[in-house]
Image (spheres, rainbow, N blue to C red):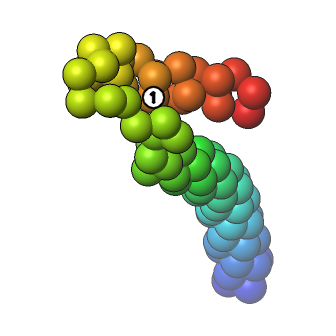
Amino acid sequence: MKGGFHHYCSVAVASLLSCLHQLRAENLRLEEHVNSLLQRRDHLLAVNARLAIPLTSQPAPGNPSMNLVGRYHHHHLIIRKFLYFR
């Protein structure tokens, strides 16, 4: 009877150790994912901050070079430059 109990305890301990190992591996994977998400958030906050910067030179009302399409391309170039040098 005593040998059966020891065998049961050994199996239970081995099973617990296996579960702990799996939990540790999953925890490490989740930590990496959280870090990845934090980096993505920081990147998006930086892009958002760049987009919030007003244009340095306001166009004259009749100047078609900075109409809506011109402003879009201007901001697009700023974003591309930011992403390239990041």
Which quarter of the picture shows residue 59? top left
Quadrant in which residue 67 is drawn? top left
Q: Is residue 7 left or right of residue 61?
A: right
Residue 3 locus on image (x, y percent): 76, 77
Which residue is located at x 75 percent, y 27 percent? 85
Give the left or right position of residue 21, taking residue 63 as reference: right
Residue 42 in the image: state x and y as whole percent. Answer: 59, 53
- Relative to 32, is 44 on the left or the right? left
Residue 68 locus on image (x, y percent): 24, 24
Give the structural element (helix, strand or loop) at label 1.
helix
Count how many numbered circles sit on residues in the image: 1
* Image point (40%, 37%), residue name: 58
Taking 25 as reference, is 42 left or right? left
Would you call the spot at circle 1 few (<14 residues within 10 Å), some (14-19), or many (20 or more)?
Answer: some
In front: 26, or 78? 78
Dot 1 amino acid type: His
Tell me what residue is drawn at x 45 percent, y 46 percent. 54
Instruction: Using the image as rendered, state which of residue 85 and residue 58 is in the foreground.
Output: 58
Query: On screen, 30 above or below 9?
Result: above
Residue placed under numbered mark 1 in the picture = 75
Where is residue 65 drawn, in percent x and y?
Answer: 35, 14
Q: Which of 82 and 8 is in front in this view?
A: 82
- The quarter of the rendered structure image containing the C terminus is top right
Query: Where, quadrant-wise, is the N terminus in this rendering?
Result: bottom right
